[in-house]
Amino acid sequence: MDIGPLNHVGVAVPSIEKAAQTYRDLYGCTDITEPGELPAQGVRFCFVNLPNSQIELIEPMGDDSPISNFLKKNPKGGQHHVCFEVEDIYKAKALMEERGATVLNEPRIGAHGTLIIFVHPKNTDGVLIELMETPKGDH
């Protein structure tokens, strides 16, 4: 398995609307998706579309969201994860575990509508890594 392209950088924020406005006003970003929800993961999200990648803004939907815990430690928000594409999420999961990494979840549907897993930051020099099955068709 070869790691694929960088898909996005996840940024935890207290308010998607406020963060999206910052990207509009400060950086001139105009291609920002409408917020969506992943109730099973306890998050709201939207994407700031850039010429070569995306920034995923993620906001907790409640106190039991993993993003709530992140924001308790980082009240203003901050980089939460880095996401790379892989061709087959099940092969990627097996290979990560074979290589000794701790995979934090079974494959599940993420914000792009494709399967994702997360690799524990202790295995990746302190960075939470999301592996995402490459979307089929346009993305």
Image (cartoon, rainbow, N blue to C red):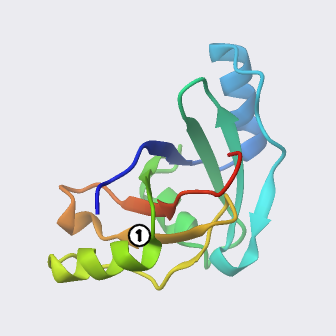
Kind of residue sitting beneath label 1: Phe
Query: In the rendered view, would you say 49 is above or below 79?
Result: above
Query: In the rendered view, would you say 109 is above or below 48?
Result: below
Residue 52 rendering spot, x and y as whole percentages: 53, 27
Looking at this view, name the residue that lies furthest to the right: 34
Q: Quadrant of residue 19?
A: top right
Residue 27 rendering spot, x and y as whole percentages: 63, 15
Q: Residues within 10 Å of mark 1 (few under 14, many from 20)?
A: many
Which residue in the structure is indicated by mark 1?
118
Q: Quadrant of residue 93?
A: bottom left
- Going 19% across and 67% down the picture, which residue do you hit? 123
Query: In the rendered view, would you say 31 is above or below 70?
Result: above
Q: Name the quarter where the N terminus is drawn.
A: bottom left
Query: In the rendered view, would you say 51 is above or below 78?
Result: above
27 and 119: which is toward the camera: 119
- Element type at marker 1? strand
- Going 76% across and 28% down the picture, which residue do you hit? 31
115 and 82: which is toward the camera: 115
Residue 37 shown left or right of residue 55 in the figure:
right
- Going 43% across and 80% down the picture, which residue do you hit? 90
- Going 60% across and 23% down the picture, which residue do you hit? 51
Looking at this view, name the residue that lies furthest to the bottom: 106
Total marks shown come to 1
Residue 40 rendering spot, x and y as whole percentages: 69, 80
Residue 128 rendering spot, x and y as whole percentages: 35, 60
125 and 113: which is toward the camera: 113
Residue 64 shown left or right of residue 45 in the figure:
left
